[in-house]
Image: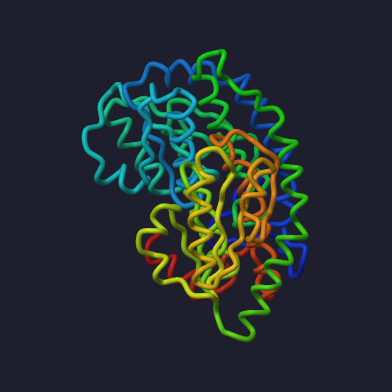
Amino acid sequence: MLQLLMYGQLPADIRRHHPYHMLEEIKLQPDAVARAISITQHGSEDVVRLLAGARRIIVTGCGTSFNAASCGAWFLRGFSRGKIDAHAVEAYDLATYWPGLRPDDVIVALSHSGTTTMTIAALERGRRGGCETVLITGFPDVGAARVARHVLPSGYAEERSWAHTVSYTAALTTLAVLANSLAVPEERLDLLPLSMVLTEALGLDGIAHRLAASLIEAESRLGPADVVIAGAGPNEFTACEARLKLQETSFTRAAASGVEEMLHGPLAAATPDTLLIVIAPGERSTDRALDLTRAAEVIGMTPVVLCAEGNAERFENAHRLVLPDVPEIISPIPFVVPLQLFAYYLAAGKGINPDLLHRDDERYLAARAQYR
């Protein structure tokens, strides 16, 4: 029986040491992606027709779900070659500020639990404006599901860790299947191999573990380190998700940036002790990512690059985590996996339970009560 835990509730099977739930759930992602593909391909015909006829699609969520929503807007624009006008808007902004909602707009909301306050408020505002509303969730019978007109299960609800990983990739996959359905038939991708690509990404477990151990050792000598993750295109939001996971699980001082943005100011704040992770899956991201890594090397950093088999040799002076070649538009799905593993091992190596996000600390429960 699935159990939806509220903020102050701790799971009965709480883990006190490695392996924590988070690691097991990261390893479930190949199966979860396969399940999400199957569920969405066979149960989304009405939603696909709705999206195809929309004037504008607004994809929304909070936190991890907003990072998925941001990638989802890229999927919709990319697969349709710009014919779909899709925007990612954070749920609070949509509920409070976003102007000009019309009845021919469609709101696609993401909430793993289905209980996120501002996501429900965004859906309610959309309904008041006459918009069609779609919810992608792990719990299709609670909260937001009673507000949305259409509900798509992501296919995964069994998470025990609050550091949502498998639910993130399941939601991303659901969005990718929807977007792929909106491409012209001859340009649609075969998404079924994604599950095998994620299995190969899990093979980087040992490298991610060593990278975390190296950072912990450096911090023992030099004090807390800055970690910056940079990506381009849809992987700018993969960088945002990695930053969030590092902050949630190991309380690391992490930042996320676009590759181009990093070159236009934030690089000035970097030092040789900054850990720079660059996401470069190939295609259009390679050249500018290479510029960033070369600039970092001049400052004295040895950047870490998540790259693909097809462009790995271009990053010969960086530490490389090499994944299989995939079309750049869907690369956020497998390329987030090594970053999740890195966040996990960094937390576990510091003696922090990455499942809890301070839910076992009365101060943070009291802080939460101020705004819940």
Q: Give me the residue at 70% from left, 65% from top.
A: 345
Work out whether residue 309 or residue 169 is closer to the camera in this orientation and state it. 309
Q: Residue 333 sits in which quadrant?
A: top right
Q: Coloring scheme of the render?
A: rainbow
Please tell me whether residue 206 is drawn above or below residue 226 in the rendered image: above
Work out whether residue 68 or residue 299 is closer to the camera in this orientation and state it. 299
Q: Give me the residue at 59% from left, 34% from top.
A: 173
Count of marks overlaid on the render: 0
239 left or right, relative to 34: left
Please tell me whether residue 321 is drawn above or below residue 210 in the rendered image: above
Task: Tell me the quarter of the image containing the C terminus.
Answer: bottom left
The residue sitting at the bottom extreme is 221
Work out whether residue 120 or residue 221 is closer to the camera in this orientation and state it. 221
Please tell me whether residue 30 is drawn above or below residue 299 in the rendered image: above
The image shows residue 216 at horizontal and vertical percentages of 66, 76
Please tell me whether residue 130 is drawn above or below residue 270 in the rendered image: above
Work out whether residue 277 or residue 208 is closer to the camera in this orientation and state it. 277
The image shows residue 26 at horizontal and vertical percentages of 70, 51
User: Can residue 313 be seen at all in this image of the molecule?
Assistant: yes
Task: Tell me the quarter of the image containing the N terminus.
Answer: top right
User: Can residue 139 be seen at all in this image of the molecule?
Assistant: no
The image shows residue 293 at horizontal and vertical percentages of 53, 59
233 left or right, relative to 17: left
The image shows residue 63 at horizontal and vertical percentages of 46, 52
The residue sitting at the left extreme is 100
